[in-house]
Structures are given as structure tokens and as C-alpha cells.
Amino acid sequence: MKTARPQARSYFVPDLSPEARKQLESEQARFIFVAESPHVSEVEPEREKDRRPLCGVAGRQWWRTLSEILEGEPNPDTSLDRQLEVCRRHGVVVLNAVQYPLDPKITRLFPGADPMKHVGFSKTAGPSSFRKKKKSAEVREAVKSLRRRLEHPAVRGLPVIALGNDAEWFVSEALGPEERDRRLKDKVPHPSAWWRQGGAFGRTARQKLEKILSPG
């Protein structure tokens, strides 16, 4: 992403996609899941190639549920090898709408990961939010990056499922009205919200995922 400062590369998280991972180049992708952005666990590995989406507490819930639906056995393993195995076996692609952290709370552990310093916007409410800055060069560059990744030859035309409201916003901006109506198939609650309302969001997510991932 052109707007990221050089030092921000330490907080860049590659996608789980045929474009970003050699191990998935021969994958016959079927679905693209788009989360919003990485957070603490996602940026912890020192080597860029070891960083991956959805590998914290919420990520463990996500992969556990996906494994149970796809393989009949819940497996919360978020290691890169296991994530790549699930993606390769089942045609799953996982992208972050923005590949750098957007939650300012990450600075409690990683002061250098301040979103305003390395991408120029954040997810918090107020004037610095991506929604308020939707016409800014920084946000448009992030949207352009997502559009490019969604149009990569290995995944072009595939159905897209947004994980949460913020991811849905970025996907809608990236695809535009016509392509959004064709490709954005659903919005599933982000796994970080599955515990809310007594677990109601988690039950909704599971029902939707079972329908999306069912054969045929």
C-alpha cells in the first residue's frame, strides 16, 4: 500500500491467498472471506511471511468453526501451516480489507503500529475514521489495494463474504455497486463479536457459514 510509511512494513500482514502465498498457488479457490484488519496476534511474528490473518482469540474461534463445518472436527489451531492446509483443502481465501492495524488500541503493546502514523486513518469513531475520511487519498489507496487483490486472476469473480460491518464497507467501496451486487454474497458477524448477546452472533455466524460452505 503506497501510503504506508517504510517502518510500517513491520506491521504488514500478508493475506491467505494464491497471490500472497506460494503454497496456495495451485489452490482451486471457491470463497473469499474478508476481515477488516490485523490486530495484536497478527503482527507479533517478526518475519513478515509468518504473519497471517485471524490468529488471535477471535481467530481461534473462526478456524475452530470452519474446521468443524468443513471437516467434522473442531480444530482451533491458528498456526500458519494449519491455516494453509484448510485453505488448500477447501478452497478458502482469507483477506484483510486493510493489511495494517486500524485499531489504535494496538499501541498499548506496539507503539509503532499507530494507524494514524502508518496508514493515515483508523477504525475509531470521529474525524480520523475511514468512514469520515472516505474521500481522502489514504483511504482511497486502501480501497484500491483491496480491489486489486479481489481482482487477482486466481480469485477474480469468486463470491465474497464480509466478516463484519467494517469489512463490508471496504468490500462495497472496492467493488462498486454493480460488482458488489454480483459478488458480495453475505455478511457474517466477525468472530470477535460471536460472544455478544449471549452468543447470538456466534450462532448466526455458524448458520450462515454452514449454508455458505455446504457442497453445491
Image: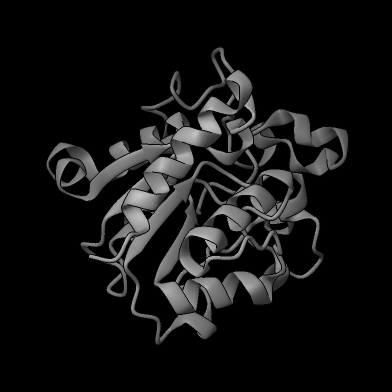
Q: Is residue 51 above or below residue 112?
A: below
Residue placed farthest to the left in the image? 178
Query: x and y percent of residue 212 in the render?
Result: 33, 52
- Among the 4 quarters of the image, the one containing residue 134: top left
Asked whether, in this view, residue 212 is left or right of residue 107, the answer is left
Residue placed farthest to the top in the image? 126
Q: Is residue 18 visible?
A: no
Query: x and y percent of residue 48 in the render?
Result: 70, 68
Q: Is residue 124 above or below residue 202?
A: above
* Residue lying at 66% horizontally and 63% vertically, measured from the top left: 75
Q: Is residue 142 visible?
A: yes
Query: x and y percent of residue 191 in the render?
Result: 58, 40
The colour scheme used here is: one colour
Asked whether, in this view, residue 192 is left or right of residue 33, the answer is right
* Residue lying at 69% horizontally and 52% vertically, measured from the top left: 60
Asked whether, in this view, residue 71 is left or right of residue 177, the answer is right
- Among the 4 quarters of the image, the one containing residue 25: bottom left
* Residue lying at 46% horizontally and 39% vertically, measured from the top left: 205
- Among the 4 quarters of the image, the one containing residue 110: top right
Q: Is residue 86 above or below residue 190?
A: below
* Residue lying at 76% horizontally and 51% vertically, measured from the top left: 41
Along the viewing direction, whichever of 52 and 78 lies nearer the viewer = 78
Query: x and y percent of residue 115 in the render?
Result: 66, 36
Residue placed farthest to the right in the image? 109
